[in-house]
Structures are given as C-alpha cells and as structure tokens.
Amino acid sequence: MRADLEIIQQWVKPGHHVLDLGCGDGTLLDYLKRERNASGFGLEINPDHITTCMNRGVSVIEQNLDTQGLDNFEDNSFDIVLMTQALQAVRRPDKVLDEMLRLGDEGIVTFPNFAHWRLRWGLALSGRMPESDALPYKWYNTPNIRLCTFKDFEALCREKGIRIKSRRVVDGQHQNNWLARFWPNLLGEIAIYRITREKT
Amino acid sequence: MPDSLPVDSVGVVTPQTYHFETPIELACGQALERYDLVVETYGELNADRSNAVLICHALSGHHHAAGYHSMNDRKPGWWDTCIGPGKPVDTNRFFVVCLNNLGGCHGSTGPISTNPATGKPYGPDFPVVTVGDWVKSQALLADRLGIDCWAAVVGGSLGGMQALQWSLDYPDRLNHAVAIASSPRLTAQNIAFNEVARQAITSDREFHDGRYFDFDTLPRRGLMLARMVGHITYLSDASMGEKFGRELRDQAYKFGYDAEFQVESYLRYQGERFSEVFDANTYLLMTRALDYFDPAYEFGGDLSKALAKATCEFLVLSFSTDWRFTPARSEEMVNAMIAARRKVSYAEIDAPWGHDAFLIPTPRYTDIFTAYMDRVAREVGA
C-alpha cells in the first residue's frame, strides 16, 4: 500500500464525510470508503479520471477550483477536506487553504517539496529547472504553477492562523524515509500535513 | 433502414400494450378509470429481476427508444445511439423498459384516446398530468412486469425529471437515477417559451378549443409554429450556424417572405412533419407537465430537503452549449444532492449541439455513460 494512503487513512475516522479536492482517479476515496466506511465527494477536472471514478463508484463532481471555487459547498459540511498533490497546481493555494478549513474541521494537504536536496542540487549544477519523480514535467508544460517548500507552507500556515496538527514526510514514491525525519526541508520529497483552524 | 440490421441494434421490436383496470388518481384531483400503457422492452430480465432499466422519454418522445419496427423503417428509435448491445445502456446486460407516458399520442391513453364516458376522443377533457403522475403509472407498470427495484431509471431532459421524481417518490425502488440535460425546475424563460408554443396552438383557427376532431381538422399551423420555436431551443447558435449559416436556397434574395434561407425551410419542414404526427392536446399537456415540475416547491424551494427521502445514487450530466437546460440547472440539482449528502457524480460535457446533445453520441458522453452503466450492471451481477 502507498505510504501516503496509509498515513492519511489513520487520520480519517470511521464514517467520516470527506471532500477530496483534485481526487484524481478516486484511489484515495475508494480506499477510504472501503477501509473507513467514509462517505463524500471528489472534485476533479481531468475527463479520464472522472470516468474512472464513476466506473469504480466514487462520487465525483467535475469542478474547477480556479474558475468555479467552492462556493457551492456549505460551511462545516465535511469532517475532513483532502487535497493530495494539487495545492501546487491551483492559482491561489492560500485561498484554497481558507476554503478547506471553511468546509471542514480538518484539512489534509500533500505536496512536493521544492527544497528537496536533489532539486536544489540539480538547479545549482545544471542551472536548469529541476525535474524529479514528484515533479516529472518541463517548466513550460507543468501544471505545478505554485511550487513551494515545506518551510514556505509552514510560514503561510502561521500567517493564516492555521495550526499544523501533524506532519509526515515521504519520498517521491510515497515511501517512508527515516532520514527525511531529521531534515525534512532538505531530505523530504513529499509532505503530508494535517491542519486545522487555530482556536480563537 | 439498411438491408441488414446493424450489429449493435436491438433489431426489430414490437411494442406491447398493457391494460390497467384499476383507477389511477392524478395530482389534478381527477382519476382515470382505466388506461393503457404502450411499452417496448429490450434485452432479458434476469432470474432475480434485478437488471431492469427504465428509460423515460422527453417532451415529444415515446416508447420506441431503440431498434426498428420493421425492415422498412427509415430510422431507429429515438435513443438508439445509447441503447443496444455494447452501447451505454447495454441490452446484453440490462432488461430495458421504455413506455409512452400517459397523455401521450403514441398508443398510451391520452387526448386522442376514446373517452369511455362519451365514446369520443378525450381531446381537451383529458386531465393535465404531472411528472409525479407519470412516475406513479410507471411504478404500476413495474409491478405488472414483476420489477421491485430498477437497477437504474434513466432519462434526458423531461425524462431526467422523471428519474429525479422516482428517487423522491419511490426511493427504495431504484438503485440509480440518471438525469441527463435536465433541470430541477423550469426557469421563467423556459415557461415563456412553452407559453409561446401553447399560444401558437390555441390561437390556430383549426384548434376549436381542442375539439378539432369534432370538426374533422387539425391545428397544423399552430403545432408547426410550436415545434419551430421548440426546435430552436433544442439547438445552439453554433450548431445552427454550422448546419445552415446564412445559406440561401437560391442564389439571390427575392425580396419577399417565403423561406429563402436554408434555416427557414428546415424549420418549416420539421414543423410541418411534426404537425402531421403529433397531437396538439398532447403537446399542450407535455409542456404543462414541464412547467409544473418543481419537487422543491413543497419544501419551501429547498431541493436538498426534498432529497432527504432519496436513497439512490445519482448521475447528472449537462452539455456546455445547452441553453434550454443549462449546466447551471444541472449544477443546481447536484448542489442540492451534495447538501443532502446523497451520492452523486456530475460532469459537464463539451458538445456543440445544444440541448439535443443528449441524443448525440460524442466520445466523452459515451465514455462516461458507458462507465457509469457498467458499474450499475456489475452491482446487480449483470
């Protein structure tokens, strides 16, 4: 099993109502439905992914976060709002984070770390935009228009009064990597954050 | 009709008429003492009677959804693109049922049927039926066919409204409701177009307050106009532009008012043909059923409250250029389902053909419809 799914499912309680922003082919929701009896919806814009979701019985809504937003969802209508590997692809990640915590008590966010040593090394040596397992695109065709580092993300959370309940770091294949625990911003490729609103 | 049947056709089909002798109470307060429903079925009902799919027709539709009535038929049923072996509604897996709704003019009891009280056609005396009445009659048909629970109830446009109504009125009698190019209620603009159509019919001198049969005539002009207006709303500006542009039938303007543009002659032809085969009173009735449809009405306009009763899963599809029932109308339905925590999937399909797109097999539409129905079939072991 993918390490990120294993980690995320630990944070989802049985029967939770879940919204997955950028749900892809529905792997995660399908997994949470089977393992956690979770209900909920995925939002997706890729036509092939949408078709796959429908075929496997994952409730999927074609909706573009950038152009349509999330106004059609009511405040506090979900237990958890997920966003795996999509934060770096939306136009305004900061606003999406606000929306996630408007809709749900808790958010789970995963994204690739642009400060991973291999990317730093690649850029330093070749002077070209880095590519990796987690970021397998060219600079001109990448959907990842808002790349950031773990430190950047954590600074944004502080600014916004978002509390980070947990952070786990995995490698580009979503495997646990003990080294990354010691120096995540250099050695971690993908982070899984569990966030909530700071109590005021 | 080609010399041989296409391999993905359900083939030559024969409609069947079911007689119902128990009165059916209608929303308007009247009852029909007895009535007929004309029905076509395709595919085989499985042993546990779990693979039945109900197809609900739209405004001018009927029971002949797929296949041919004879080898001389020019065209197959109205949704032959989606129903047949290997098609989205796969007749190798499903038992497909399609009926002509009450009030129709293709064999089920309606304004052209004989009123047992007078021995003459009902005409304008036929009660105004609603989407809820249709669903009730469809449930009675399901009883007759021995179908406790539909694997899916599927419809486009007004047919999608019936699928939605099913989910509210008989929540435990369907697993899935599929509403394509549909709407949870008509807008003022929709009703306005219907009113123009009705005025066209009722102001025809041959209409005679709906008793045209007594005068041995038909309100052809009115029905033709109604269909012309309706037809415009089924197409998109782009698709009309693509099909006709500003093309003239002859080389030059004639400075008169005959049909000079191709689009004019097309609309006139469609309207005239329709006026020969469709009943004017049925047209009035169908448009009224559309106007009245509003399942949220008794819940203060809150569709999500109405949906609290529903237990089935929903598939909602819209088409980008549909301006009769825009994607926004489908999204209204979807948002209510989300708020009610119903299981729903939704996609807006990019297609240039306006409302009619639900009858035209574009690749993405076919892919989604096939993928969803494949799952519906798997669930019932079909």
Image (cartoon, rainbow, N blue to C red):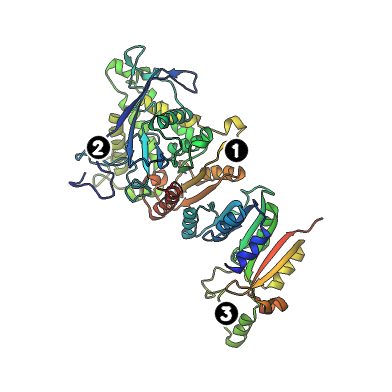
**Quadrant housing residue A65:** bottom right
Give the Cα separation between the discs numbered 3 and 2.
65 Å
Tags 3 and 1 in contact by the CB under 8 Å rule? no
> At which x and y percent is residue B4?
19, 47
Left or right of B264 on screen, residue A9: right
Subunit of label 3:
A
Q: Which residue is mark 1?
A: B308
**Quadrant housing residue B197:** top left
Under circle 3, the secondary element is loop
Give the Cα separation between the discs numbered 2 and 1.
42 Å
Which mark is in front, 3 or 2? Answer: 2
Q: Amino acid at mark 3?
A: Met
Q: Is residue B344 above or below residue A93?
A: above
Q: Which residue is mark 3?
A: A129
Left or right of B103 on screen, residue A131: right
Q: Amino acid at mark 2?
A: His
Around disc 2, counting alpha carbons within 10 Å, would you say few (fewer than 14), some (14 to 19), or many (20 or more)?
some
Under circle 1, the secondary element is helix
